[in-house]
Amino acid sequence: MHRQTNRQGTVWLLAGTGDGPPLAAALISQGWQVHVSVVSDMAAHPYRGMAVEAIHVGALGGSQAISQWLQRIPVDWVVDATHPFALRISTQLHQSCQGSGQQLVRFERLREASGKAVVLGSIADLANQPLAGQRLLLALGARQLVEAAKVARQAGAIVFARVLPSPMSLVQAAAAGVSQEQLAVVRPLQGSEPGALEAALCRRWGITDVLCRQSGGATESLWENLSMEMGLGLWLLRRPVPMADVPVVHSLDQLLVHLNGTTP
């Protein structure tokens, strides 16, 4: 297949709605041709109107399907800017790129945890924390909800949860034993201003502590700010360690230097 060329080359960017649009805009402004992959039509909306080559919506279908995609649409770089806890897709990307000799770079924002936050190595570590009688809000992904609710109750906490409006989230909330009165089905960062809805939930339920993931993005920043403003205990689930043989960058500047410095 003939590859359309320009000064820089072609990038396949896999990202969410937080880091993805600014990364795409910056890459385009630097002369890169950008293909974008997102999980849903709603996640694709921020990219509408950008001069991207294409927006690919939906699940990728595993390592073999990714390899087939790369054969149909050759790119110079794959940029994995997916959520740090989306281990399955990152592993599949790594396997596909490694098998085909495709260049891959991982983009992860880093934040230093505030002095107030306690970083946990795993959900199991929550069992040893002073949570007896505390009203704990689980602001985690649905896949970790059942385990987190179980361990939190073992530590004596009263469990509440905030989940996305998806069938899987509702199924997991039910499996975790979270009642309707203690469950909020919302989209993150909703409200008249960032954090307004989350702050209202904390006030309504009398939340004393929050457990979220150390994502390095807007959601972690939001909970750090709310914990300081509202006097909440903040527990961060430590992000997974990136794969050792995949280069990692932590800022847009680092990404551009990496792409420009090592692209053939």
Image (tube, rainbow, N blue to C red):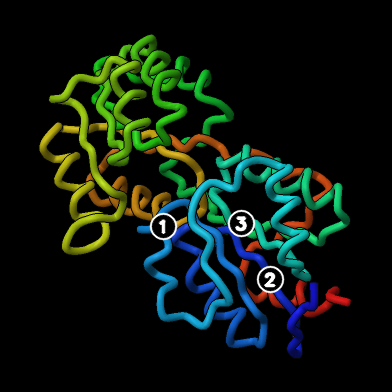
The residues tagged by marks 2 and 3 sit, at their Cα atoms, a distance apart of: 17 Å
Is residue 245 shown left or right of residue 10? Answer: right
Judged from this view, the residue extending furthest toward the bottom is: 7
- Classify mark 1: helix, strand or loop: helix
Please name the residue that numbered disc 3 is placed on: 108
Q: As shown in the figure, which amino acid type bears the numbered disc 1?
A: Ala
Please name the residue that numbered disc 1 is placed on: 218
User: What percent of the width, then of the height, locates residue 245?
Assistant: 84, 48
Against 99, is 54 above or below? Answer: below
User: What percent of the width, then of the height, locates residue 48?
Assistant: 41, 74
Please name the residue that numbered disc 2 is placed on: 11
User: What percent of the width, then of the height, locates residue 160?
Assistant: 25, 27
User: Which quadrant: the N terminus?
Assistant: bottom right
User: Which quadrant: the C terminus?
Assistant: bottom right
Instruction: Return the residue nearer the eye: 15 or 243.
Output: 15
| Mark 2 burial class by Cα count in 10 Å: few <14, some 14-19, many 20+ | many
Please tell me which residue is depicted at 19% across the width and 50% down the height of the picture: 197
Give the label, 2 or 1, closer to the camera. 2
Q: Earlier in the sequence, mark 2 or mark 1?
A: 2
Q: Quadrant of residue 158?
A: top left
Please tell me which residue is depicted at 46% across the width and 29% down the height of the picture: 143
User: What percent of the width, then of the height, locates residue 130?
Assistant: 38, 19
